[in-house]
Amino acid sequence: MKSESLAVLAVHAKEGKKWALLVASANGWYNYGMQADVYHAYQVFKEGGVPEEHIIVMAYDDIAEDRSNPFKGQVFQSYDLRDTYKGLKIDYKADSVNKKTFKAVLQGDKQAVKNLTGGDGKVIDSGPDDNVFVFVSNHGSPGHICWLDGDDMSATELNGVIKNLHKNKRYKNLVFYIDTCFSGSMFEHILPKNIGVYAATAANATNVAWSADCASAAFGEQATCLGGLFSINWVYELLSDDRTGSTMNMQFEEAKLACKGQSTPHQYGDLSIAELTQDQFFGDSAQNKKPRQSKRHRRSTETQSVVAKHMLAYQTLKNQLSRMPENSLEAERVRAKLSQVETLMGHADQFIKDVATTVYGRFGSDESFAWAETNFGPINWSCYEPVVKSVKDHCPGMMRDEDVRYFAGAKFGLLVNVCNEFSTSTVLAAVKAAAKVNALCNI
């Protein structure tokens, strides 16, 4: 961690406007934490003096009134139960939270937003002197950010948008914070270092991300994870740091340290931007009179119970069941749902293994499969992209069911590996063969 004295040497950018695009597209109770991440970030920007018209929120907006929420109309991101839903303004909700709308909003394309949503929604109307911050808390798979409608965004697609923003002089400094599984794969080997873009991710290119604070006693039987492990900690750094004297890199290093090796945060792009002070992106208005939390007390690290994001559906149900009276009607309902999810996960796991086994002839032990899921080189997009599309086409059941889709996506590292060793036609044939014999692909 760099010393505090480095803050004095941090370069202050020419004053321009600050913009923030905050996105959580996942829905459902077990994805509570992703929306909570975004809601808390909104409050941080607002309290920092960033104008509301420059903060754009995209969130499904179902957890505040979810039947499982013991605090109706409220959303928390930590055990201190600070309501982050109060005063929140969500600009795009439900089905309007999708890849196409995200791209239009980020690029300031008002006409495209109108065509997509039928309204005059806010966009990032930034210029060459402005600092733009984009935060996405979601699910992901190698080389992709997941969207609820299944139309996922690839790394090549996202970086195409970034290059277009640079070409059109839509920012001075552009920052991405991405909290998804395999989030590093959205930038590794792709994002240039010389176009004024800096990215911090919750995971490196080959690892899953983690959710945290998953055992709040206040939620009782309905306990769910309250946020992403990385996101909870970078937000809390803002609450404890002097934003005018602390750099983006200091924030990142503290958040990374707080992850304790569970998540694997990483940085990409133009790292000189990380030496800018936090106030240049998050604000630090004099109107924010709240006392800063001390680093010693801001987080109770002993309570950071964690769950891998791709396992949220399964683990949330399992945690809930452990807190319920064994013979209650609700326990029976959750037990049945858990059994269904376990069955679907088994089918998804077998499908990906069958693809690899068909290609290799034989593959090996379960340990070999597990290793290959999170150990892979640069993505061969000319093979991987059509193979992922083929998986969606030939096994729609696996990609349609939200309880298993993200679990399956976390195993796509196997597909990256086979694409790096075999021809596209060989892998596509293996996908078709695996789909024919898999129950999940024929429902």
Image (spheres, rainbow, N blue to C red):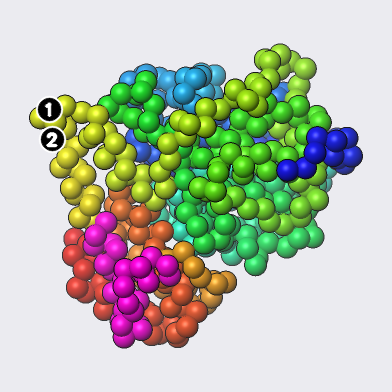
Spatial separation of the CA atoms under disc 2 and disc 1: 6 Å
Disc 1 marks a residue whose amino acid type is Ser
Residue denoted by label 1: 328
Q: Which residues are magenta?
A: 345-372
Tell me residue 33's x, y (percent): 45, 35
Tell me residue 437's x, y (percent): 19, 73
* Quarter of the rendering containing residue 240: top right
Front residue of 119/416: it is: 416
Residue 159 shows which numbered tag? none
Q: Residue at x 76, y 21 (%)?
A: 285
Q: Are marks 2 and 1 in contact (CB under 8 Å)?
A: yes
**Camera sees residue 124:** no
**Camera sees residue 392:** yes
Dominant secondary structure, magenta: helix
Quadrant containing the C terminus is bottom left
Assess disc 2: are there few (<14), some (14-19) or many (≥20) residues with their C-alpha within 10 Å of its C-alpha.
some
In the depicted structure, whether residue 64 falls above or below residue 265: above
Q: Residue at x 30, y 28 (%)?
A: 222
Disc 2 marks a residue whose amino acid type is Glu
Residue denoted by label 2: 332
